[in-house]
Amino acid sequence: DAGVTQSPTHLIKTRGQQVTLRCSPKSGHDTVSWYQQALGQGPQFIFQYYEEEERQRGNFPDRFSGHQFPNYSSELNVNALLLGDSALYLCASSYGNGDTEAFFGQGTRLTVV
Amino acid sequence: DQQVKQNSPSLSVQEGRISILNCDYTNSMFDYFLWYKKYPAEGPTFLISISSIKDKNEDGRFTVFLNKSAKHLSLHIVPSQPGDSAVYFCAASALSSNTGKLIFGQGTTLQVKP
């Protein structure tokens, strides 16, 4: 049983560019949440998708957008990249309402230069 | 506004002894709490959770205690093993408010010395 898988694992982008990160949830899970983890900090909630709709959003600008597909996989898009967007981006999946015992992927390390 | 705080950035204990990791929260709407462990280059791994209707939950070597009046929870690891060396995150959620997002603390790095 595959867990949560994220791609790519590492990415280097130039300031101003756009990036798309991908996530496949654990089998049986229908909810996907995205988190940003800056160095030395805990993960910060970006948004959550359920039934292909954004259900909740954290304090992130509109440059951060996402999508969930019918097979429950999800994408995180970030436009107009800033140096401060450099972080580990984590995807978490769970079933139904809430992130009880959410399962995390290994993350995508994004570096903006 | 840091709603979940782990005030100790690091903790070092001897193998076989008890490790106690602490976490404080400010939002009284939080009703579900979780601990995650994270190794370098891996995503956080769920360890143990507790609902606000309980004050203790135990799973093998791991026990979480919740003091709602103090808005404080702690994770006890007994006995500690070198493989427990990792970053530990406390997280909180307000399930009763139909919000499933997790609010994380900054993490505590635990080192267990052989």
Image (cartoon, grey):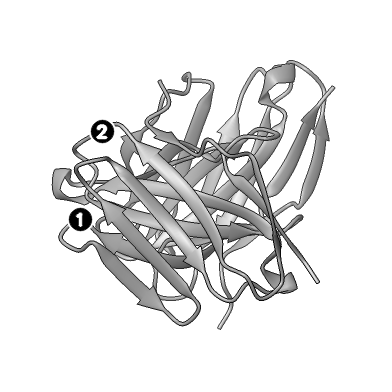
> Of A11 and A101, which appears nearest the observer?
A101
- Identify the element where label 1 is drawn: loop
Residue A73 in view: no
The local crowd at label 2, few if under 14, some if 14 to 19, many if 20 or more residues have their Cα within 10 Å, is some
Q: In which quarter of the image is residue B84?
A: bottom right
The N terminus of chain A, quarter of image: bottom right
Residue under label 1, please give it.
B52
Please determine whether, in this image, residue A60 is positioned above or below residue A71.
above
Residue at left 44%, top 54%? A69
What residue sits 74% from the left and 18% below the top? A83
Left or right: residue A11 compared with residue B53: right
Task: Report if the CB atoms under discs 1 and 2 are less than 8 Å apart.
Answer: no
Q: Residue A101 or A49: which is nearer the viewer?
A: A101
Amino acid carrying label 1: it is: Ser
Question: Disc 1 sits on a residue from what chain?
Answer: B
What chain does mark 2 sit on?
B
| Residue plotted at (54% across, 21% down) | A63
Q: Where is residue A104 in the image (x, y as percent from the top left)?
A: 54, 59
Q: Nearer the viewer, residue B9 or A110?
A: B9
Please tell me which residue is depicted at 58% across the width and 54% down the height of the picture. B88
| Label 1, label 2: how far apart the Cα atoms are | 13 Å
**Dot 2 amino acid type:** Asn
Element type at marker 2? loop
From the image, tell me which residue sits under label 2. Answer: B27
| Relative to A13, B72 lies left or right | left
